[in-house]
Amino acid sequence: MKKFAIASHAKMAEGIQSTLELFAGKDLDVTYMSAYVEDAPEIEEQIATFFDNLKDEDQAVIFTDMFGGSVNQKMTLAAQDKENVFIVAGFNLPVIIEIIYGADVYTRENIQALLENGKDAMQLVANVAEATPAVAETEVVAEEVAEEKVEAPVLDGIIPTTLRVDERLIHGQIAMVWSRELNLQGILVANDQAAENETQQMALKMAVPSGINVLIRSIDDVAEILKEPRAKTRRMLVLVRTVGDALRLAKKVPNMSYLNIGNVGKAVEGDKQTLTQFVMLTPEEMQSLGKLVEIYPEAALQNVPADKKELASSFVK
């Protein structure tokens, strides 16, 4: 079994808990340790309790805040001679998620490789003028997704594509969690406004993990891309901003493998019906949801992969 610990001076570890749970859910076996604070046991006691609960068959990865700091030193001493315990000193959220999802069985070699991937997430963000050439280069590479053209729609058989409703489109959960869960080769953003806005495209593409192509197109253009033969062989995630947009696309492409309703409604004003913590729909969107379920009966509400799928049909009268 994989177990994890995040240990820090003061309450940094507690601070990262809510953020990590937002990205990865609450089912992970993570222990959070705060050192030298009045309302927590002594750090030595917390460390001892963690190691007492480790079984011989468990693997544990422990993240400490500072290499050489007292928390790191105490953890290193406690872990000596334990071959299945690995300590990572210095961490950020991408590093933690990269390692948590990066391997079923840990070795020093694969943890080092995952650590390097997480380090790459730390970058100086370019302004619009500086980023424009990079965006253009990414666009050329991403055009491979839509390379093959056919005259007639190809809709026979299920295509390995997930359609997700997410009002933020590409963001941290997509980059760090869903891309790994779905083992993505490409991301298609189906949004008429973003397709016409180069600045928004630049911002969205900053979140895309390396090795994953991205296209930002209108809903109609994405529908045509998904009708091409190559769509049958590529694992793609299609992102739309609203349930209405999902319905519009689903009418054109009714053979995607999974329809996921993730984050929607927080940015919408007016009367809304709360379905889950992350899904709030207007009366018009509820009507669209009902029609969407007719096309995709297995459509489900699911914020992150660790969350239980709640069938959208259960919310439709």
Image (spheres, rainbow, N blue to C red):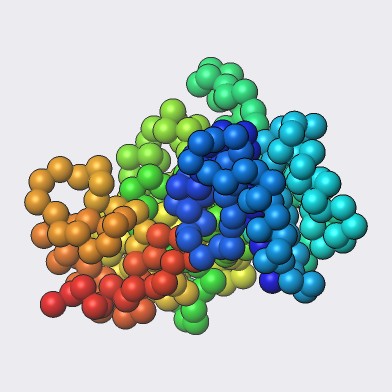
The answer to whether residue 309 of the structure is visible from this angle is yes
| Picture quadrant of residue 179 | bottom right
| Picture quadrant of residue 125 | top right
| Picture quadrant of residue 165 | bottom left
Front residue of this view, candidates 265 and 43: 43
**Residue for point 17% across, 64% down:** 286
**Residue for point 57% across, 22% down:** 126
Front residue of this view, candidates 46 and 248: 46
**Residue for point 74% across, 71% down:** 55
Residue 90 image offset from top left, x and y in percent: 71, 36
User: Looking at the figure, which quarter contains the C terminus?
Assistant: bottom left
The answer to whether residue 153 of the structure is visible from this angle is no
Q: Left or right of 173: which side holds 105?
A: right
Front residue of this view, candidates 248 and 225: 248
Residue 227 image offset from top left, x and y in percent: 47, 67
User: Looking at the figure, which quarter contains the N terminus?
Assistant: bottom right
Q: Is residue 107 above or below residue 126?
A: below
The residue most toward the right is 81
Residue 4 image offset from top left, x and y in percent: 65, 57
Q: Left or right of 316: which side holds 133?
A: right
**Residue for point 60% across, 34% down:** 36
Image label count = 0
Q: Is residue 284 above or below residue 112?
A: below
Residue 214 image offset from top left, x and y in percent: 55, 47
